[in-house]
Amino acid sequence: MLNFMENIEEIPLAEWVSKATGIVSDSFAFLFDPIKNEFGDGLESFADMLAAVPPVIVILLVAVLAFFLSGKRFGLAAFSIVGLLLVWNQGLWEELMLSFSLVLVASLLSVIIGVPIGILMSKSKIAENIITPVLDFMQTMPAFVYLIPAVAFFSIGMVPGIFASLIFATPPTVRLTNLGIRQVSEELVEAAEAFGSTGAQKLFKVELPMAKTTIMAGINQTVMLALSMVVIASMIGAPGLGREVLSALQRADVGTGFVAGLGIVILAIIIDRFTQSFSLKKGTNI
Amino acid sequence: MPVIKVEGLSKVFGKNVKQALKLLEEGKTKEEILKQTGSTVGVNRASFEVEAGEIFVIMGLSGSGKSTLVRLLNRLIDPTEGHVIVDGEDLATMNKKDLLRVRRTKMSMVFQKFGLFPFRSILENTEYGLEVQGIAKEERSKKARASLEMVGLGNYVDQYPSQLSGGMQQRVGLARALANDPEVLLMDEAFSALDPLIRKEMQDELLDLQDTMKKTIIFITHDLDEALRIGDKIALMKDGSIVQVGSPEEILMNPANDYVEKFVEDVDRSKVLTAYNIMKRPETVNIDKHGPRVALERMQKEGISTIYVTDSKRNLRGYVTADDAVVALRSDVTNLTAILKTDAPSVPKDTLMNAIFDISHNSPVPITVVEDGKLLGIIVRGAVISALAGQGEVNLTHA
């Protein structure tokens, strides 16, 4: 009685998923292939372009931006200069630029996809009920798992890396956009409506500006998650600092691994402070 | 010709709306309906008319449905049943496009907690109603500035709401509502979030503005004093129903039922009213800044013979009399310290009126109401007597 499970056949769940992935990959090849080729080429030339700019110019530009974004203080600017010089000195400049372009593109796509979905969720209870469990699924499924279909759809390289990052990093933007809009006080929404705003006017003139700080916090999270995918995505051939970490791991080379890891940390801190300063600066009047 | 005509307007929140409406017809109470259907009756078949240029006050305690009722008027909440006819158009059944037009041009609203957009400057807030209509920047800026000028905030256009006091923020709320020159102004507990002295000031200002604007105003309040002060007509609400509509006198003299009577009945005021209720804003001079000349000028302007002296932090220091100030002025004394008297009686703000009566009888100068050394207000003898007699301006909200 207690081992009734023996009589029940194992459900071929894994097989189903594999088949489904195969079908999707085959039937949407007309979509995936151009993405893989055109988008992949575009990405590469973008990364090459970034890498072609002399490091000195990039460092100076970052330092000046840091100085103004942090409210004309020197801390972040000084850190950026020292950190980036160190990465350059270690011969990891090109890898840094590759990783940065991966994070940048993945984050941009996440925001472009995530914010509208968040808005949809905030406006429709049904949409919220459907999307919330999907987001939970996306966030709890181990990030490595996304690498497998990514390879099936886009083979290896930067494009599948971005695809995996996208799935992994989008949820915070969606969630916090939804939350930010729902948190706008009832009275302000009523005020917007009482003066005859259309739905779009209410959204763009009141709700999004009020939710901006919360949405920016979500975007900051998204960027950080995209960055954390840099190492994972290197397992499917995404170039950059992650690949250095991975190869150091395979050779048990502590020193090289540490240096590449440090490069990621420096990149993370600079990006984090930059995105945070956007949300804080605009929020001063609230 | 009424500007607004409300006919059988009801709102039921919850699921069994039809059943609840039927029970309402049968005359069941709000509680019975809640028990039977699980639905809450917000507003129960309200009907009234508001004439042009009238201040129509809807008054009731919290939960009486007055805030719901006002939101049914501009359809921030969709009515379950009934009609809201404004200028011959029924808002309850009109389509979205017409509703936008009515909200943009005919009705504006002022909110209890002001409802200002914190990320917009005062000018941008005031422009909002014009902006959503797509009016060109220059024109809307001109109108908004004129509107701000009208409420006395012409110099604050570039400030942000958080930089302004509550009273000033509500002036912005009022200016924003007036900027698109609506016929009807809906004011939902507009002054309830303000402290009593500022509230009275705003009431006076609204009445002054109304003298020139002649808008039709629907004003929601839970404060009887406020209703009596500003209302041309008052509607009393209880459990979602309007129990009486009439002029302030009619309501006071002929209360329609026990509920209304309870609202206005003359309780033994001396045991209820406190110093805080009857004090008024004092005229003061600042000992750190002003001398006998300023003191004398203010006393002459106000027609009083003593004036209270505070320091820059509004701590009470004493008072000076007109006679002493004249003498000081003649002998070229420029400081108030020399003629300062400190023997004015003072009471805490929660002192009951029957205690104040004795003090005021024996004191030649107004009693001061003091908290933590700061001067909150003063009580003149006349105020005590008229409050005891059930007349005069009494602030009935709790301190």
Image: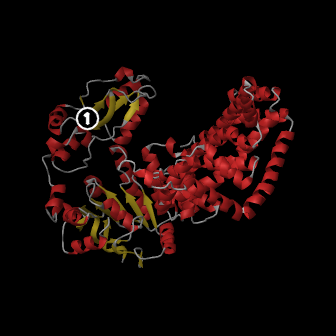
Residue lying at the far top of the rendered structure: B338
Is residue B107 in view from this perspective? Answer: yes
Between B293 and A77, the one nearer to me in the picture: A77
Depth check: give the residue in front, A76 or A171. A171
Task: Indicate whether A280 appears above or below A261.
Answer: below
Q: Position of residue B67 (x, y in %)?
A: 34, 59
Residue at x 75%, y 48% (from the top left corner)? A156
In the displayed structure, would residue A105 be above or below residue A194? above
B182 to A65, vertically: above or below: below
Q: Classify residue B35 as left or right of residue B142.
A: left
Q: Residue at x 65, y 35 (%)?
A: A273
Question: Where residue B338 appears, x then y in whole percent?
Answer: 37, 20
Image point 49% across, 74% down: which residue? Answer: B98
In screen coordinates, is B365 left or right of B101? left
Residue A30 as seen in the image, left or right of residue B271: right
Q: Which residue is mark 1?
A: B349
B359 w.r.t. B92: above or below: above
In-front residue for pair B325/A203: A203
Q: Secondary structure at mark 1?
A: loop
Q: Quadrant of residue B133?
A: bottom right
Q: Position of residue B208 (x, y in %)?
A: 40, 57
User: Which quarter of the rendering shows the N terminus of chain B?
Assistant: bottom left
- Residue A199 as seen in the image, left or right of residue B37: right
Q: Amino acid at mark 1?
A: Lys
Q: Is residue B144 visible?
A: no
Of residues B144 and B260, the one nearer the viewer is: B260
x, y percent for residue B156: 55, 46
Q: How is the image coloured?
A: secondary structure
